[in-house]
Amino acid sequence: MTTTRGLRDRDQPITMLTAYDALTARLVEAAGIDVILVGDSMGTTVLGHDDTLPVTLEEAASHTAAVVRATDDALVVADMPFLSVGVDESETIRNAGRMLKEAGADAVKLESGPHTVDITERLTQLGIPVMAHLGLTPQHINQLGGYSRQGTTTEAAEEILSLARDHEDAGAFALVLEHVPANVAAQITAALDIPTIGIGAGPDCDGQVLVSADVMGLTDRHPPFAEQFGDVAAAMTDAIDAYREAVETGEFPAAEHSHIEEGVDDLE
């Protein structure tokens, strides 16, 4: 079973994928993935939103619980939705605690900044493990003006490094680095004792994470740093087309799909 403490002691790269439902989570765990992130990317991948901002705490908790029910060994990390953290300390604690106490997550992930250092320390003091997230933070899309690469100047890179150290000191057990230059991520990884997990951050992080829909080829478009490792969309389309055709031609259901009960032929 993967634990937050055990991530530090791994000899091979950490693998992390998103999942938002029991079926996908069961397949992801069966493949040996270490960490399942119930990301707020559910907003765009399964809920039909244009970005992650509309995802509610209730939706995040419900999807997290579904993933937890389907898994035994993977570390399940719940992404905290927009405005569920940082508005008020007591509300932040209640919201994050709910992900563990009610939804069954092993940890929470915070899109991090200067405002989440104290929050991280307080949550970890209360027994709520925190995965920090720096670089591109999609919940700040309106502030960033898009999904552009971060840490591209010395000043910006040093700010990310400083925040990474602050969150490590505050008790974060791992750090996601998103869409930052590979050489910046490599230096941050070398400077920290906690593991880094990259997404668009090069090969020198301690692990990698992608959105499962991108990995499986279920999206029409994916970020430039993602890779499509299969074409599940094509397989699903073929199966759905075959079902429709079988129903329309009368081939389905066949005799083996039906049951005839003797003695009930004379209904009036």
Image: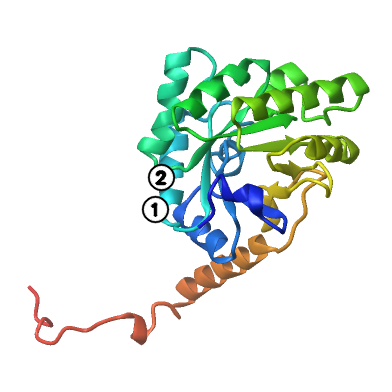
Q: Do the residues labelled 2 and 1 touch (CB within 8 Å)?
A: yes
Q: Nearer the viewer, residue 50 or 93?
A: 93
Which residue is identified by label 2? Answer: 65
- The residues bearing labels 2 and 1 have C-alpha atoms spaced at a distance of 6 Å
For the point 50% across and 58% down, which residue is it? 1
Amino acid at dot 2:
Ala
At label 2, counting other C-alpha atoms closer than 10 Å, the crowd grade (few under 14, some 14-19, many 20 or more) is many
For the point 72% across and 55% down, which residue is it? 13
Amino acid at dot 1:
Arg
Q: Answer with left or right where residue 174 lies relative to residue 123.
A: right
Q: Does residue 249 lie above or below 138 as drawn?
A: below
Give the total number of marks visible in the rendering.
Answer: 2
Q: Does residue 255 lie above or below 49 as drawn?
A: below
Q: Nearer the viewer, residue 212 or 104?
A: 104
Give how far across and how far down residue 175 sits, in percent: 68, 36
For the point 47% across and 20% down, which residue is it? 92
Residue 77 is labelled as none
Which quadrant does the C terminus fall into? bottom left
Residue pushed farthest top?
88
| Residue 84 in sight from this viewpoint | no
Give how far across and how far down residue 191 sits, in percent: 80, 35
Q: Does residue 175 lie above or below 239 as drawn?
A: above
Which residue is identified by label 1? Answer: 69
At label 1, counting other C-alpha atoms closer than 10 Å, the crowd grade (few under 14, some 14-19, many 20 or more) is some
Q: Does residue 186 lie above or below 148 as drawn?
A: below
Asked which quadrant contains residue 120, the reply is top right
